[in-house]
Image: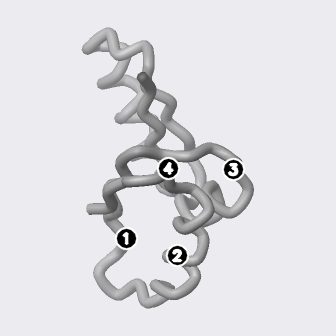
């Protein structure tokens, strides 16, 4: 139905928006924000979540706690 992309790098988010326009992807929401911050303030529930944190990132406990409230029953996290 809909895809939400969150990236805290403005250039990356801008490039994603440009690519989405080029490809005509109108059900794609691209946010220039930290993904964890987005999960903590959003009430949206997801079926599938793809995670790509920086390699040195270590805040897994906080991430999984935030994800717990953002997943539909049977959701998959990759």
Q: Please report contact status of discs 3 and 2: CB closer than 8 Å, yes or no.
A: no
Q: Please report contact status of discs 1 and 2: CB closer than 8 Å, yes or no.
A: yes
Dot label at residue 37: none
Instruction: Name the quadrant containing residue 74.
Output: bottom left
Per the image, the residue denoted by label 1 is 53
| Disc with the residue nearer the chain's start (3 vs 4) | 3
Local secondary structure at mark 4: strand
Residue at screen point 47% across, 38% down: 4
Dot 2, how many residues are within 10 Å of its Cα: few (below 14), some (14-19), or many (20+)? some
Local secondary structure at mark 3: loop
Asked if residue 8 is positioned above or below residue 20 in the image, the reply reads below
x and y percent of residue 35 in the render? 53, 59
x and y percent of residue 76 in the render? 32, 56
| Disc with the residue nearer the chain's start (1 vs 4) | 1
Q: Please report contact status of discs 2 and 4: CB closer than 8 Å, yes or no.
A: no
Dot 1, how many residues are within 10 Å of its Cα: few (below 14), some (14-19), or many (20+)? some
In screen coordinates, is 58 left or right of 51? right
Label 3 to label 4: alpha-carbon separation: 13 Å
Per the image, the residue denoted by label 4 is 72
Per the image, the residue denoted by label 2 is 63
Local secondary structure at mark 2: helix
Per the image, the residue denoted by label 3 is 42
Nearest to viewer (mark 1 / mark 2): 2
Residue at screen point 32% across, 64% down: 52
Nearest to viewer (mark 2 / mark 4): 4
Label 3 to label 2: alpha-carbon separation: 13 Å
Instruction: Name the quadrant containing residue 11.
Output: top left
């Amino acid at each position: 139905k809909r895809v939400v992309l969150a990236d805290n790098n403005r250039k990356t988010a801008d490039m994603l928006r440009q690519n989405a326009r080029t490809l005509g992807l109108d059900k794609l929401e691209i946010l220039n924000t930290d993904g964890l911050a987005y999960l903590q303030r959003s009430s949206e529930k997801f079926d599938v979540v793809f995670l790509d944190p920086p390699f040195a990132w270590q805040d897994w406990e906080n991430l999984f706690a935030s994800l717990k409230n953002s997943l539909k029953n049977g959701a998959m996290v990759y």
